[in-house]
Image: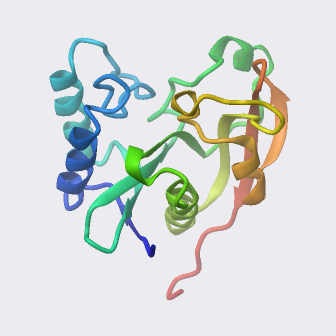
């Protein structure tokens, strides 16, 4: 299947919201708010309103993966470390922080019926393209190694180390049993390309 990447903004909010609602609020009503500084567990409705406000105000970034029928089937959330301060393994990360990142990739989601069809790969490619368009810089993510072990899909919301490595990310420091800080430097996209 062919996919199109669109940035999450006011014009794509409806497609994003339909995907989240089709998947019961994603991760129990998170609405992909867990990494934002104003994350809460009040309710799915609260998270929906907070996410919509962030999107409308330009305080949330994601590469939406749109299928041939115009439906969103997944995303990759990214943003500045200030936009996305909530990361997995924070305590271990803070013991020896890596060089400051310009961008952070924190969350992937793929519709349950579309897993294993290249949506996460398309979402990461899309996020990298959008980051390059927005000036490039150092990108970090915290992801899990899955090679040689059975990993439960619902715990892989930050994708896999192996996927990041396929896109030129390097392992930095291990911060959890299977978790690594991944990083990559990308250049700004040239105008007109």
Q: Quadrant of the C terminus?
A: bottom right
Identify the residue at horizontal 24%, vertical 26% (top origin): 47
The answer to whether residue 6 of the structure is visible from this angle is: yes
Rendered position, 183 above or below 81: below
Looking at the image, which residue is at 26% across and 45% down? 55
User: Can I make out residue 111 in this image?
Assistant: no
82 and 110: which is toward the camera: 110
Q: Which residue is drawn at 20% across and 62% down?
A: 11
Q: Is residue 47 left or right of residue 137?
A: left
Q: Quadrant of residue 155?
A: top right
Task: Please provide percent x and percent y for residue 124.
Answer: 57, 56
**Residue 114 at x, y = what percent?**
43, 54
Looking at the rendered image, the quarter that the N terminus falls into is bottom left
Horizontal placement of 183 versus 25: left or right?
A: right
Query: Where's residue 61, x and y in %?
Result: 40, 49
Q: Which colour scheme is used?
A: rainbow
Residue 80, above or below 34: below
Q: Residue shown at 61%/69% (left/top)?
A: 188
Above or below — where is 131 with respect to 79?
below
Locate residue 25 relative to residue 1 in the image: left or right.
left
Q: In this view, does 185 lie above or below 22?
A: below
Instruction: Specify the farthest residue to the bottom.
Output: 192
């Amino acid at each position: 299947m062919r996919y199109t990447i669109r940035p999450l903004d006011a014009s794509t909010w409806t497609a994003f919201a339909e995907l989240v609602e089709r998947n019961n609020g994603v991760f129990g009503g998170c609405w992909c708010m867990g990494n934002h500084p104003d994350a809460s567990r009040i309710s799915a409705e609260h998270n929906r309103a907070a996410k919509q406000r962030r999107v409308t105000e330009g305080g949330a970034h994601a590469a939406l993966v749109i299928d041939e029928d115009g439906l969103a089937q997944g995303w990759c959330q990214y943003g500045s470390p200030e936009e996305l301060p909530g990361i997995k393994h924070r305590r271990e990360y803070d013991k020896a922080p890596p060089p400051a990142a310009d961008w952070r990739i924190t969350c992937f989601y793929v519709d349950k019926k579309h897993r294993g069809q290249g949506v996460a790969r398309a979402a990461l490619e899309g996020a990298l393209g959008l980051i390059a368009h927005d000036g490039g810089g150092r990108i970090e993510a915290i992801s899990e190694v899955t090679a040689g072990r059975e990993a439960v899909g619902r715990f892989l919301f930050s994708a896999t180390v192996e996927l990041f490595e396929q896109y030129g990310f390097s392992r930095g420091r291990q911060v959890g049993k299977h978790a690594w800080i991944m990083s990559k430097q990308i250049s700004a996209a040239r105008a007109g390309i």
